[in-house]
C-alpha cells in the first residue's frame, strides 16, 4: 500500500480511499480535512474515523 503525503494526495490518487471518504457525513469529512497532514493511507483514514467516533467527536 502506498503512503501519500496528506489526505488530499491520498484522495486524489487512491480511488478506494476517495470512495470511502465520500460515504462519510459532511461533518466527518470536514474534521478530517482540518488535519490533512496526518493521513496518508486508507488504513490511517479508517483508523482516524474510528478514533473520532470512539471519542464521540463526530457522529
Image (tube, helix red, strand yellow):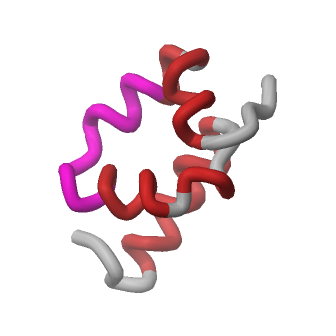
At horizontal 67% and vertical 57% (from top left) the residue drawn is: 38
At horizontal 79% and vertical 33% (from top left) the residue drawn is: 3
Q: Position of residue 58 (x, y in %)?
A: 29, 73
Count of numbered tags: 0
Question: The C terminus is located in which quarter?
Answer: bottom left
Q: In the rendered structure, does residue 25 fall within the stretch colored magenta?
A: yes
Residue 57 vs 17, above or below: the answer is below
Q: In the rendered structure, does residue 2 fall within the stretch colored magenta?
A: no
At horizontal 22% and vertical 60% (from top left) the residue drawn is: 27
Question: The N terminus is located in which quarter?
Answer: top right
Judged left or right of residue 37, residue 29 is left
Q: Position of residue 41 (x, y in %)?
A: 68, 38
- Considering depth in this image, is 9 or 14 the residue closer to the camera? 9
Q: Position of residue 12 (x, y in %)?
A: 52, 20
Q: Position of residue 23 (x, y in %)?
A: 26, 36
Secondary structure that dominates the magenta span:
helix
* Quarter of the rendering containing residue 57: bottom left
At horizontal 43% and vertical 84% (from top left) the residue drawn is: 55
Q: Which residues are magenta?
A: 18-28
Judged left or right of residue 19, residue 50 is right
* Quarter of the rendering containing residue 7: top right
Judged left or right of residue 55, residue 10 is right
* Quarter of the rendering containing residue 48: bottom right
Residue 59 vs 11, above or below: the answer is below
Amino acid at each position: 500500500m502506498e503512503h501519500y503525503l496528506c489526505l488530499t494526495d491520498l484522495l486524489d490518487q487512491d480511488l478506494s480511499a476517495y470512495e470511502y471518504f465520500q460515504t462519510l457525513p459532511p461533518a466527518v469529512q470536514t474534521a478530517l480535512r482540518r488535519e490533512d497532514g496526518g493521513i496518508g493511507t486508507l488504513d490511517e483514514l479508517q483508523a482516524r474515523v474510528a478514533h473520532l467516533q470512539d471519542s464521540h467527536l463526530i457522529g
